[in-house]
Amino acid sequence: MKRYVCEPCGYVYDPELGDPDNGVEAGTPFENLPEEWTCPVCGAEQDMFVPE
């Protein structure tokens, strides 16, 4: 699974880890993130992420 990088702050979303602090289970591909999910560091929307 691809990792995605938040362009504004550099946070990397790793699908193998998910984002458990924000309700995203490990193994969740970026494409399957809930619509309301935003960068946990800077709050950027998903369209601000690019494949690593």
Image (spheres, helix red, strand yellow):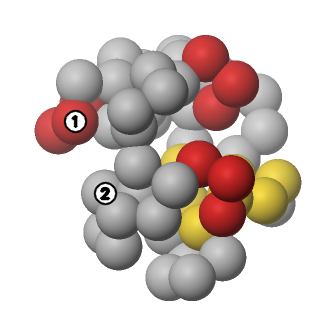
Coordinates of residue 35 in the picture (x, y in percent): 49, 27
* Disc with the residue nearer the chain's start (1 vs 2): 1
Q: Is residue 10 above or below residue 21?
A: below
- Disc 2 marks which amino acid? Pro
Q: Hey, which residue is sitting farthest bottom in the picture?
A: 9
Q: Tell me: 50 left or right of 49.
A: right
Q: Are marks 1 and 2 in contact (CB under 8 Å)?
A: yes
Coordinates of residue 49 in the picture (x, y in percent): 68, 59
The image quarter containing residue 34 is top left
Q: Residues within 10 Å of mark 2 (few under 14, many from 20)?
A: few
- Disc 1 marks which amino acid? Asn
Q: How many marks?
A: 2
Give SS at disc 1.
Answer: helix
The residue to which callout 1 is attached is 22
Coordinates of residue 40 in the picture (x, y in percent): 31, 57
Question: Which quadrant is home to the N terminus?
Answer: top right
The residue to which callout 2 is attached is 40
Give SS at disc 2.
Answer: loop
